[in-house]
Amino acid sequence: MDYIKKAPITGCLKNIINILWTFSAASDRVGVGCFVNSCGKCAACKAGQEQFCEKGTVIVFDSKDYDGTVTQGGYSQAIVVKDHFVLHIPDELSLANAAPLLCAGITTYNPLKQYNIGKDSRVAIIGLGGLGHIAVQFAAKMGADVTVFGHSESKREEAAKFGATGYEILKDTEDFQPLAGQFDFILNTVAVDLDLNNYMPLLKFNGVFCYVGIPSDEIHLNLFSIFGNQANLTASNVGGIAMTQEMLNFAAKNDVKPQIEMIGIDDVPTAYQNILDSKVHYRYVIDMSTLK
Amino acid sequence: MDYIKKAPITGCLKNIINILWTFSAASDRVGVGCFVNSCGKCAACKAGQEQFCEKGTVIVFDSKDYDGTVTQGGYSQAIVVKDHFVLHIPDELSLANAAPLLCAGITTYNPLKQYNIGKDSRVAIIGLGGLGHIAVQFAAKMGADVTVFGHSESKREEAAKFGATGYEILKDTEDFQPLAGQFDFILNTVAVDLDLNNYMPLLKFNGVFCYVGIPSDEIHLNLFSIFGNQANLTASNVGGIAMTQEMLNFAAKNDVKPQIEMIGIDDVPTAYQNILDSKVHYRYVIDMSTLK
């Protein structure tokens, strides 16, 4: 079977343009993530990194497929997807919980795996939002010692609930100094302007600062701030299909659950305003059966 | 023997404040590099990364040693150095050639080794000066395919002489586009303001851009320029003692030679002006026997 066509059951409202689905077929429970086609032949595709396909990955919405059609995203009652890009949803995961994992989950799981986070790692997660609350769970379940860098006291308890052992509010340069040289990996989930010259010295020798929240403006860095620890700066863009399946299996086995609120299609305008107002905890999932 | 005291034979004039030595003892030919003490007990020292000593590495000049004395550098007739920080100069290397290797050599060799450059690597070196002309030789002798990014035609032939198979003059954004996604590693040896948004897309998936020439101003980067190849940005600061010895042995075995001009101590003012005027090819070495 090359193609699967099923009615979507749930969708994850990440922002105004991004929606992901899970489906319930007669026998298999399956989902579709961020992309729906790639050439399958280039070095990236062969390495299981379809997101870097040299011919151009076909994104699930507003992207031109190789036959010229424009992908329509998932605010719909049905979708046709090449089987390679359809993920199996393990029985332990509800379809509603699986939906955000197909974007926020793989976005955070992929860099944690790529940089070998495990029981000997000390990890910091910047931001405890839609991405951050899943990143904390993944890193903790991988065995890492996890600290959340937040901007107010309001999320300290929630950070602990998700598995963080530390919580730091970092504002002034003096707040950073006691943490110098302590972290193997810092994952930044917030797309705001950070003073990297404060954050980079928190890394151990050869540590990595990885953006998954990408600010639209240029970042600034004085390289002398990494001259003492030879730290690395990078950014990560979701993950390949095999890694996405691995992530779903890991989430199922280790009880990693996005915290969601299920809404009907008519609730989208209100939910979107709540996202703009930072009132979402932590992901909205749309019940697609409400789309008539 | 804890300490070695010998009259220096040659010194490498890197810039106005940095001088390195080689010595000729009765039996051993030895050299002293960028640092002369570290705690020996911290994780960095134990890992052979004395340059990141947590107690603070003692630099060869103008640095406070643990006993409170200030290091004097090597414009002198004698130096006292703890034996751990004294390097063996292999017979195949002249003392004059060994002197620049103890700074420019280890500065370029260390990142090439750290990022596993070898026969399957495609490497670009930005700049063909004191650091660059040694970096090209090391990378080529490690088996990499080496391209030099220069700013004029004048160094094309010299780049090839040092082992580069490619030479590119990159000015406008259009100059960069044909090279997109081609390099595993880019070593930047020039401390000037580069448009990283042009350079980072030249890297392959997970490629590394490493600064060894550190600009005093902040660097700027639009993270979307690395979102397609998940490239890494880092900086490297010389290398540890064991790596420095390995570098000298590698240079001896593979005939890596800094291109030098030997001068007397009275020539230093002229030589320094030539450095400011970019007229040095590629390193001055001072014959310390001329210091009376």
Image (tube, coloured by chain):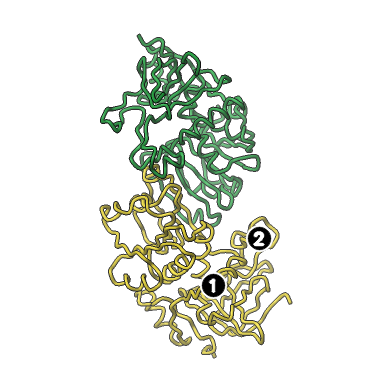
Chain colours: A green, B yellow
Quarter of the image containing the N terminus of chain A?
Answer: top left
At 34% across and 54% down in the image, what residue appears? B195
Do marks 1 and 2 share a chain? yes
For label 2, the SS is helix
Q: Are marks 1 and 2 in contact (CB under 8 Å)?
A: no
Q: Looking at this view, is B132 or B168 the one in front?
A: B168
For residue B168, what is the image quadrant? Answer: bottom left
For disc 1, the marked residue is: B102
Q: Position of residue A113 (x, y in %)?
A: 55, 39
Q: Position of residue A188 (x, y in %)?
A: 49, 38
Q: Position of residue A98 (x, y in %)?
A: 50, 22
> What's the residue type where badge 2 is placed?
Cys
Q: Chain of mark 1?
A: B
Q: Looking at this view, is B201 or A87 the one in front?
A: A87
For disc 2, the marked residue is: B45
> What's the residue type where badge 1 is placed?
Leu
Q: Position of residue A114 (x, y in %)?
A: 53, 42
For residue B43, what is the image quadrant? Answer: bottom right
The alpha-carbon separation of the residues under discs 1 and 2 comes to 19 Å
The reply to whether residue A181 is in sight is: yes
Question: From this viewpoint, which residue is outermost toward the front?
Answer: A1
Q: Chain of mark 2?
A: B
Task: Please tell me which of labels 1 and 2 falls first in the chain.
Answer: 2
